[in-house]
Image: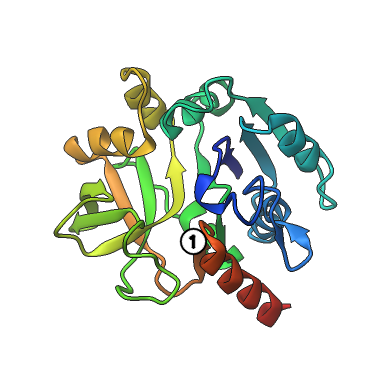
Amino acid sequence: MRAIILAAGMGTRLRAVSPSKPLTPIAGQPLLHRILGNLAAAGITVPLVITGYRGDEVAASARAWPGGTAETIHNPAWDQPNGVSVRCAADWLGDGASLLVMADHLASPGLYAQVAASGRADAGLVLGIDRRMGHPWADESDVTRVSTRRGRITAIGKGLGTYDAHDCGVFLITGELMAALGGLAAPGLSDGVRLLAARARAAVTDISAHDWIDIDDARSLSQAEAWVSRAS
């Protein structure tokens, strides 16, 4: 199994604490290395890191990962919405499937493994969703919200008023998502998901039994540090 890691953004909400989200130390290791290590523990051993802001430093960190090395692709339009970064991996993905993860979301190996095993012939992507509303690690004001019905996404976005799950930032994707994003000028990832959802091609898998956290500010960084320290 392969994984695309989106690590191109500027991470403005964490800038007061760290100049680069992927390079932010979490219990003594860069966040990017933590993600790569948890992916490897889940059996996902072919990673591709999409770089952008501070791209040379992030690429060097990917190459220096003690568990191996990660291929990198630089997105020169890194200041555009994150769907543009996803499209950079279109040739690398080809006709296959891959996990798609965010470089500011840390998830347990079990979560990565569950989503990796969730492929369906009747879906172009599968999103890991968390139904634990009110979880102390979730920033309700910023989390991407998901509305589902019968195992499929019906709506997604940060501004949804009615929803039943949170987007955990871990997807299993195919070329269908790349094709959807390719028809848009400067898409966010959620724009591509909405197109597939409109065709009933966006499925979900409930990962509520697993831990994950979006490290977006000083508070969530502290929570992540405590989680990793307890687990080690």
Q: Position of residue 108 (x, y in %)?
A: 58, 66
Q: Position of residue 176 (x, y in %)?
A: 36, 29
Q: Is residue 120 visible?
A: no
Left or right, 61 with reference to 167: right
Q: Which residue in the protein does label 1 denote?
A: 114
Q: Position of residue 136 (x, y in %)?
A: 41, 77
Q: Residue at x 37, y 22 (%)?
A: 186
Q: How many marks?
A: 1
Identify the element where label 1 is drawn.
helix
Depicted 191 relative to depicted 158: above or below: above
For this rendering, which residue is in front, 103 or 120? 103
Q: Residue at x 47, y 25 (%)?
A: 87
Depicted 65 relative to depicted 209: above or below: above
For this rendering, which residue is in front, 215 or 15? 15
Left or right, 58 with reference to 165: right
Q: Residue at x 31, y 17 (%)?
A: 183
